[in-house]
Image: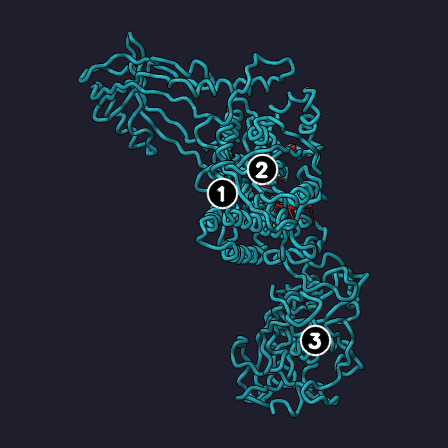
Chain colours: A cyan, B red
Amino acid sequence: MNVLNVAEKPMVARTVATILSRNQNMRMREGRSRYNKIFEFNYTIRGQPCHMIFTSVTGHLMELEFDDRYRKWHSCDPADLFRAPVHKFVPEDKKDIKRTLEEEARRCQWLILWLDCDVEGENIAYEVIDVCTAVNPHLTIKRAWFSTLIDRDIHNAAQNDLRDPDKRVADAVDVRQEIDLRIGASFTRFQTMLMKDAFIIDTATDDRNRVLSYGPCQFPTLGFVVERFWEIQAHEPEEFWSIICSHESKEGTAEFSWMRGRLFDYTCAVIIYEMCVEEPTATVTNIRQQEKPKYPPFPLNTIELQKRASRYFRMSSDHTMKTIVQEQQGHPEWGIYAQRLMDPEAGLWRNPRGGGHDDKAHPPIYPTKFSTGESGWSQDHRKLYELVVRHFLACVSKPALGAETTVEINIAGELFSACGRVILEKNYLDVYRYESWGGSMIPTYTNGQQFNPTKLTLESGVTRPPPLLSEADLLSYMDREEAKIGTDATMQDHIKKMLDRSYATKDSSTRFTPTNLGEALVLGYDDIDMTYKLWKPDLRSEMEKKMDDVKKGDKSKAEVLVTILQKMEACFLEARLNKVKLLEAMAIFFERSTRSSSDELHATGEVVRRCGLCQESDMLLRKNRDGNFMVGCMGYPQCRNAVWLPGSVSEAVVTTNTCNFCTPGPVYLIQFKFRRLEIPPNYSPNHLGCIGGCDEILAQLTEICGRGPRMPARPRGPTAPTSNAHHTNPRQGACMNCRETGHSSTDCPLRYGNVQHHGTSEHNGEASVSCSSCGTPCVLRTANTVNNRGRKFYSCQSQECNFFVWEDSLNAGTGGRSVTRSNSIPALNPRQTGGRGSRGRGGQYGSRTANTTFMSATGDPISGRRCYTCGDPSHFANVCPHRGV
DNA sequence: GCAAGGTC
């Protein structure tokens, strides 16, 4: 029987193969991958003679990625990434390993997986299974369960502990991978596109390469740094008072500390102090004596080694790992590899993982070989070697032993205590010189003894803020059981990423300070009152819990994915809706850039569809200088595809809903708000519409109300802005009161806002009434509501004013009044549509009367002179006699 | 140009 064995790394394959073959008749041959050798030998599993073929992968064989359609940053709305299809694939540099597995699996009957016994190992198992069963579906698959690379354990695994792989555990990892990818990519694209070009960000990073990344591990890591920084900033020094008491005798000095500690109330402190000074005799009330051990540290694991090297030698965690590799560079066999490993250009370096072999009993890091120091060792290498040796020796040493005496005294009712220590046995402290345990002798006291303190003073002090987070602090925060950020192997990757992204800096004493950029990002998200605080570890810990549900089989992978992704998508939309908070936070630290950025529109979801004309760029929803909405191709001016929207649109927002009919999709629906007075009464002012061509209502309103101009905007006067339109008030240069040019609002003749000319005067056959708010001439209209159909009224042309007055009430002399739009508003007279509905747009260019066209959703011109209701070219639908019949 | 997780 041929058995294919696969280990997680080449080293394990070699070791296990050597153990199982008892190093006899084991042959090694090359596979497709130069690093992953193949070992062959014969072995008997429970009486069954097997030909063992032993090879390896190198960690994960597959990666998760979005389908091609979504890979490019501008290919879609970042919000789509929560639903975009993803697939697992074998990346180019792993293809040769895949080929080896395929070739070997074809001629085997069994597949035994010798992967690490952790969740990632279980996931890798299924990657290997997928590749192997694709070429050989009849394989019998087993997972060898082992925890150390020692003979007994390995033979036992092969003979007695071949288990079935656990899909649920692998599924839990799939959940994590997919969520990390989706939230990482969506938020990274969103915040990068929103802010990169909007501000002048003055960090060391080259602008073109700058990515404002978001990751579920890197961001909480930054969060810890910022939170501490804020604590320090928020700290207000506070003065406190404390009574200091000491007693000196021939035997030595005892420093007594006040049991009340510190008092922040000066008066209170002084009163107590004066009581003590008046009756200063101290009485010994209690003496406790006990032997106290000081325990040596636990055995070193990777994180602990990194933390201690950081604390004792100020070595960064990745430097610690690299130092051990450094001296291997001169070795005749693997020296070249070690050199590559240390070469930043090669990008080969990666920190070790926690591994699945922790049986909580064996010291994971210990000196494997005696050395008095080699000639090639650097100072740091010596220090680390020494730490490992001393730490190991300390681990297996007896605790230090001290005798501790605590003396309590009473002065005028106030209690003080002093502590003295004598070290009886130093034990492990003899070798572990990084830790000290100072002894301090105090005089001998007896119960009831009385004495006068040598010193009794009231001293003041000031509270201090906590220090900046050190690397050891940060690792501890990330390593907390309840909210673990990353794995042992990746924790320092996340720290490094935070530094690489210029979110924080590390000073010479390994303490972290957030940069302006890092602080602005955290501040921006903090200002948004989101369901999840993106910069806190809670999200990660919730995901870990959900992963446990999948592991245990309580919930399915699909179920958990849907739940988390729905929440995260809502969270994303929440953030985007409040993008102004992010921009405001950035604006605190950075100057606004004048660079205009189409990226920002992408980030904020204003992409409506792919342009059908040039098929290269997206079409974006835009508001032009006249305030009219249109959907135009980003490829302008090369591509001039555009869809003009009705002039009565007051608001338009691209939603994440897509049209079910229009192709090629997706075509995102737009939530429109129309100005009530500019649309016929039987149309709703709120409309979720499609610009893809299927939307009848939108087409009708475009016809009725006119649309934005196809021609370039009107030539502007010298005061009108010509550039940076989005940064400038388009009404700049005009009176804020009446919006006329030529004067400012302070000199405005209409500034008191009264009805200018009440009464009626014949002017072009119409009465002239001015708005009571802004003074501009009103338009005469005819109501079309149930109660007032046919009744005439004047209303202000400005959309800001609510002024209207019934014509008959003017005649009756009752005057005008302002109303809110939600009241019974008379509808606009269809015959008067030229007055307001096409203000400055179609009307200006004669859309109603000239031989005009309007654009279809595809950008094609359509003859627009036909009633939608009855088809009669002599009128439009809004005045159709058949309407409502 | 995005994440985090494996590893030569």
> Which residue is tagged 2?
A50
Screen quadrant of the N terminus of chain A: top right
Q: Nearer the viewer, residue A839 or A102?
A: A102
Mark 2 neighbour density, 10 Å: few (under 14) some (14–19) many (20 or more): some
To the question of a shared chain for discs 3 and 2, the answer is yes
| Residue A307 visible in the current orientation | no
The amino acid type of the residue labelled 2 equals Cys
Disc 3 vs disc 2: which is toward the camera? 2
CA separation in Å, label 1 and label 2 = 18 Å
Disc 3 designates what residue? A839
How far apart, in angstroms, are the residues tagged by discs 3 and 1? 77 Å
Query: Which residue, given by chain and number where applicable, does mark 1 sit on?
Result: A163
In 3D space, how far apart are the residues under numbered discs 3 and 2 (Cα atoms)? 88 Å
Subunit of mark 3? A
Count the marks: 3
Question: Which structural element holds mark 1?
Answer: strand
Do discs 3 and 1 belong to a common subunit? yes
Q: Residue A779's x, y, as percent?
A: 65, 81
Left or right: A196, with A167 as reference point: right
